[in-house]
Image (cartoon, rainbow, N blue to C red):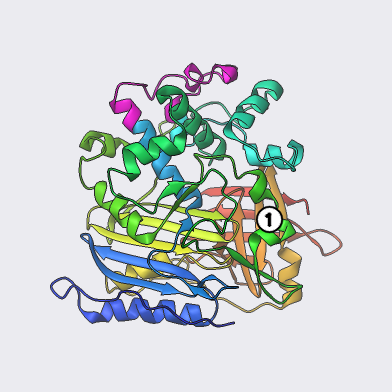
Amino acid sequence: MKYKITFVFLFAVQILFGQKNIQSIDSLLSSLYAKSRINGNVLIADKGNIIYNKSFGMANESTRQELNENSIFDLASVSKQFTAMGIMLLKEKGKLKLDEPFSTYIPELSFYKGVSIRHLLNHTGGLPDYMEIFEKSFDKTKIATNKDIIDYFSKEKPEALFAPNSKWEYSNTGYALLASIIERVYGLKYGDFLSKYIFKPLEMKSTFVQKNKHPSNEIKNLAHSYAYSDSLKSLVLTNELEEYNYVKMFSGIVGDGGVFSTVLDLLKWDRSLYTDRLISAEGKKEMFRPAVLADGSNFNYGYGWQLDSNEVFGKVVSHTGGWAGYLTLNELHIDNDKTIIILFNHKGSEIVNKTIRYALYELPEPNPTGKKEIILTPEQLNEIAGVYQIQEGMEFFITLNGDKPYASMTNQTPLRIYAESETSFFLKEFDATILFEKDENGNVCKLTFSQGKHKMKAKKIK
């Protein structure tokens, strides 16, 4: 199904850019939209000057309200940037120290020994994921809160996944606890704290923490989230589909998500990171440093930011988010002062920031694998689709959006994968492969994910 494209704002800064790269980006995105592969807003800036700002599709399918630059999206895990900044603000106010135990402020969880606030910030604390636990054990008729996480963990004492700082593993639990630390240290609700110390000072007038993340018609300019229903053969609000019932249950939890915003407000946020308006220059450097594990190895994640650096783009800090139809990205090219912001509201949309990067710099996009994609039948794709368990509380998902397969780990943004053979798939964003294995009956039973020297095996459980 195709929708009218709302043209918002598109121009080139002549001194810095010709029309070629902007036209290339617009052609790419328009082509993807025409194929129903994106729906949402894209903003690109150079040194704070907007060079591309365009909306694709509808904010509300029933009223036919079109998206525009003021449309408000659930940022999902991009919210973690603001939680991390909140902690850094408290650090610089002398209210807490990053290397003290997080249980200093949440004593109910003091049995998790050796886990510091810093470990929660860079995902090296080893705490189990509350989402996995609550989906199995929490009363799904209720709306869970941060307090419920603390109360449950205090009572049931779920075992840590690994010793603090021995591994890196993405943790929504850690960021929910960081939000609770902000509340306990400063005596303000998480949303009120962010509003007072970040949103209002930066004049982010359309940004807020929703007390109930469940999409509501009460939010003016909300970009409602949709997913395609195979049974109904149409787009449906995610809150009307049974598979998204978890959204309401988790709608009272903040810190790991819960921030709503627009592309224009996010640009204001990004501009502040080039100044000392919120925290010191040294504080920002610390946020953008990779995690250092106990064995001395580094992992390219700072405090609420994924880190990347190469000769072409320089230092890049970013974060993606995915939540019930929303797919989001905030990406800053620190060395070159460029910004890419993507906010989508249709499940199955594709984050194409890597392709946009190369077009922005007027460079051909490389294929790091050199591999060629083949087309598989729906039956062959259905064989690999499913849930694969890596370990307790950590799963690998292979999902299909029409004839396009995607891979994701627990609570991570899905990435498109491409078939090289019936059982061998690769990614185009980076050099990684997924190899599926079959049992003696010819059924897919496990997979192996490989990236460089690292391999991860997972057994199919459903």
The residue positioned 67% from the left and 44% from the top of the image is 249
Q: Which residue is mark 1?
A: 244
Q: What is the span of residues highlighted in magenta in the rendered image?
A: 89-118
- In which quadrant will I find the C terminus? bottom right
Residue 351 seen in the current view: yes
Left or right: 44, with 390 as reference point: left
Left or right: 142, with 2 as reference point: right
Where residue 49 sits, quadrant-wise, is bottom left
**Residue that sits furthest to the left in the current view:** 15
- Rendered location of residue 418, percent (x, y): 58, 70
Q: Is residue 106 magenta?
A: yes
Where residue 117 sits, quadrant-wise, is top left
Q: Nearer the viewer, residue 450 or 267?
A: 267
The residue positioned 37% from the left and 60% from the top of the image is 263
Residue 395 seen in the current view: no
Specify few, some or many for label 1: CA neighbours under 10 Å numbering under 14, 14-19, or 20 or more. some
